[in-house]
Image (tube, rainbow, N blue to C red):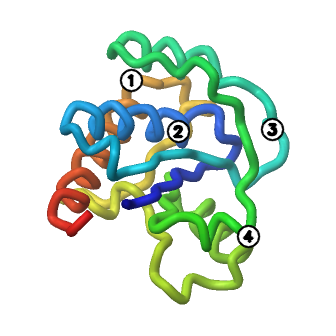
Amino acid sequence: MKRILFVCHGNICRSPMAEFVLRDLVKREKMDEQVIVASAGTSAEEIGNPVYPPAQRTLREHGIDPSGKFARQLTREDYDTYDYLIAMDRVNLRNMKRLFSGDGEGKCFCLLDLTDRPREIADPWYSGNFQDTWDDVYEGCQALMLRLASEAL
């Protein structure tokens, strides 16, 4: 069993998109009994809010329903709960490691570091471009699926 937590700033755009994309990929590959996926934010400002409407629309355009997801804040306990804590960008990765007092077990990394083109996932809250975010998240989740498939679950 692998437990994966995606992390962005507010947990209303990028990390829930990654959560639902990976859940969809895991289900399609019939690995949903072996992989648990969730998301959180490093900030407290969006706690309790649903997925941001343009992010919801983008997910739904791709056949994924994000209903029932509400933002939550990352906690210290998450480090012990999850096998991978995956950031959408370097600022959130830094904030995660600060909260966890480091990353002694090497659980924290950026999603697109798993791809052939490591980079940050741009925050669509500022760019307004949710399709580009979808493309990046999908690419990263496909790379993560390859990693999961190669591991003994």
Task: Return the disc, 4 or 1, that comes first in the chain's sequence.
Answer: 4
Residue under pointer 3: 47
How far across and down, in percent of the image, does residue 143 sit? 23, 53
> Element at badge 4?
loop
In the picture, the quarter occupied by the C terminus is bottom left
How far across and down, in percent of the image, does residue 139 sit? 26, 43
How far across and down, in percent of the image, does residue 2 sit? 39, 60
- In the rendering, which numbered label is found on residue 131? 1
How far across and down, in percent of the image, does residue 51 sit? 63, 25
- In the rendering, which numbered label is found on residue 14? 2
Q: Residue at x 29, y 40 (%)?
A: 26
Question: Which tag is nearer the camera, tag 3 or tag 2?
Answer: 3
Q: State the residue in front, 144 or 110.
A: 144
Looking at the picture, does residue 75 appear above or below residue 27? Answer: below
Q: Residue at x 51, y 63 (%)?
A: 85
Q: Residues within 10 Å of mark 2 (few under 14, many from 20)?
A: many
